[in-house]
Image: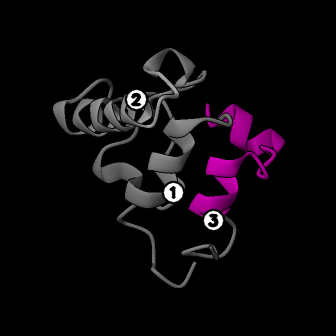
Amino acid sequence: MTPMKRKQPSAHDVFVGNWKPTKNDTLSKRYPGFGATMNVLYGDLICGQESNDQMNFIISHYQHYLDLMGVGREHSGDYLDCADQVAFNPSSENSDS
């Protein structure tokens, strides 16, 4: 429910639509959607690396659970992946940032 690091939103706020991207976010190709949620949680481990198997695996599980809950994968939303996003929490950055 709370941000993992300063200067980034919480995964919860992104997922439920409370997060509004700043100009810096939009310049970094971070927009509201499941991709930004993955970005908060995984950073550059899966995001900003074009399309990759790890990211696509997470997306497919998300869509599977949408289907199981009766929502349907067609309601996954825009900006489903984080392939082109700059990471909120780059692994090379100090963890106190």
Whether residues under marks 1 and 3 lie with C-beta atoms below 8 angstroms apart, the answer is yes
Q: Which residues are magenta?
A: 9-30
Relative image position of residue 11 (x, y in whole percent): 57, 59
Instruction: Identify the amino acid type marked 2.
Output: Ala
Q: CA distance from mark 3 to mark 2?
A: 20 Å
Residue 10 image label: 3
Whether residues under marks 3 and 2 lie with C-beta atoms below 8 angstroms apart, the answer is no
Mark 3 falls on what kind of element? loop
Is 10 in front, or is 52? Answer: 10
Q: How is the image coloured?
A: one colour
Q: CA distance from mark 1 to mark 2?
A: 13 Å
Relative image position of residue 7 (x, y in whole percent): 69, 68
Q: Residues within 10 Å of mark 2 (few under 14, many from 20)?
A: many
User: In the rendered structure, which disc, 1 or 3, sits on the residue that comes first in sequence?
Assistant: 3
User: In the rendered structure, which disc, 3 or 2, sits on the residue that comes first in sequence?
Assistant: 3
Residue 40 image label: 1
Q: Which residue is depicted at the point 39% across and 27% down?
A: 67
Mark 1 falls on what kind of element? helix
